[in-house]
Each structure stands twice: as C-alpha cells, then as structure tokens.
Image (spheres, helix red, strand yellow):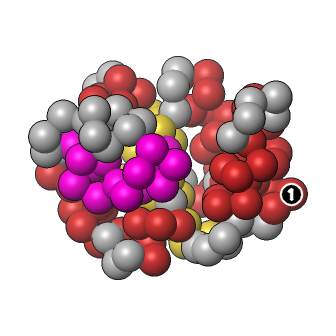
C-alpha cells in the first residue's frame, strides 16, 4: 500500500459534488485514511502552491483555492499516486477520459474539481500540510 493526497476543490464543493466524488474515490478502490472540510486562507494557498509561484496562473489559482471550502483527503491504495491521477483524469476536462472525476465534475481547466499529488514525496508533504499524524487512521 502507498498513500496519496487528494483535494476536492471549492468549485466541486460549491456545486454539491463532494459526496459524488467521495463515492467515486471509494468505488475506485481507495481507502480513505484522513478526511476533513477546510477553508484555507490566501496565505495557506500561497504556501501550498509555492512550487507554482513563478507561473502566470499562480495568483488566480491561490485566489480560487481560498475562495471557499475544500475537502482534503489522505488515500491508501496500491500505487496510490498514479492510481489517483488516473482516476481524476487530465487537468483540462475536455481532454479527460470518460468516467474520470474531471470529465464528470470539472467546469474548466482552472476549475477542475480535484487536486492530486504528482509523486510520492509530494503526497507526503501535502498530507503533512493538512493533517497531523493523529488525524490519520491506519
């Protein structure tokens, strides 16, 4: 088993799709070992997305991510990082495969419903950003 970080972004929470996405996560075979509803501040969004600071979309991204509540999750599965990335689909929902979370629930490339870690090391750092060790089960 390995672990990855997932986030249901403000657009999907506001649209009422968090429950559907959580059901999708479970049907895909992930074990949820941590989950909570959070409202991140602009400062937290800037810290979380620090790796993108020099990119042109950074300001818009951090503003969006601090605009409403998100659901953060720690997920366990075999090959969790890649399995989660396959489950969510391409960043642009127009390019996402049928049946993926982004194809089903994303509004646009910018409002793409969910976040997924891109590597095991990133997943560990992102989980630690949102969860204390005692908040994870298993």
The image shows residue 113, relative to residue 54, as above or below, that is: below
Q: Position of residue 116 (x, y in %)?
A: 47, 38
SS at badge 1: helix
Q: Where is residue 22 in the image (x, y as percent from the top left)?
A: 30, 61
Magenta region, residue range:
100-115
Asked where in the image residue 15 lies, by quadrant, the reply is bottom left
Q: Nearer the viewer, residue 97 or 34?
A: 97
* Residue 84 relative to residue 11: left or right: left
* Residue 20 relative to residue 138: left or right: left
The image shows residue 75, relative to residue 134, as above or below, that is: above
Is 107 magenta? The answer is yes
Asked where in the image residue 88 lies, by quadrant, the reply is top left
Q: Nearer the viewer, residue 57 or 45?
A: 57
Q: Position of residue 55 (x, y in %)?
A: 74, 30
Task: Name the residue located 61 percent from the left edge and 74 percent from the top edge.
Answer: 68
Q: Position of residue 87 (x, y in %)?
A: 26, 38
The image shows residue 138, relative to residue 107, as above or below, that is: above
Label 1, on which residue? 43
- Please indicate, yes or no, whether residue 6 appears anywhere in the rendered image: no
Q: Nearer the viewer, residue 126 or 51?
A: 51
- Please indicate, yes or no, whether residue 8 appears anywhere in the rendered image: yes
Task: Name the residue located 35 percent from the left edge and 55 percent from the top edge.
Answer: 106
């Amino acid at each position: 088993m390995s672990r990855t970080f997932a986030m249901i972004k403000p657009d999907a929470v506001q649209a009422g799709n968090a429950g559907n996405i959580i059901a999708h996560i479970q049907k895909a075979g992930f074990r949820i070992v941590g989950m909570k509803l959070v409202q991140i501040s602009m400062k937290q969004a800037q810290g979380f997305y620090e790796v993108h600071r020099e990119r042109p979309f950074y300001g818009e991204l951090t503003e969006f991510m601090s605009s409403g509540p998100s659901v953060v999750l720690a997920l366990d599965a075999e090959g969790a990082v890649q399995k989660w990335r396959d489950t969510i689909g391409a960043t642009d929902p127009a390019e996402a495969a049928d049946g993926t979370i982004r194809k089903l629930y994303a509004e646009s490339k910018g409002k793409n419903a969910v976040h997924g870690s891109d590597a095991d090391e990133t997943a560990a750092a992102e989980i630690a950003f949102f969860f204390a060790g005692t908040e994870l089960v298993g």
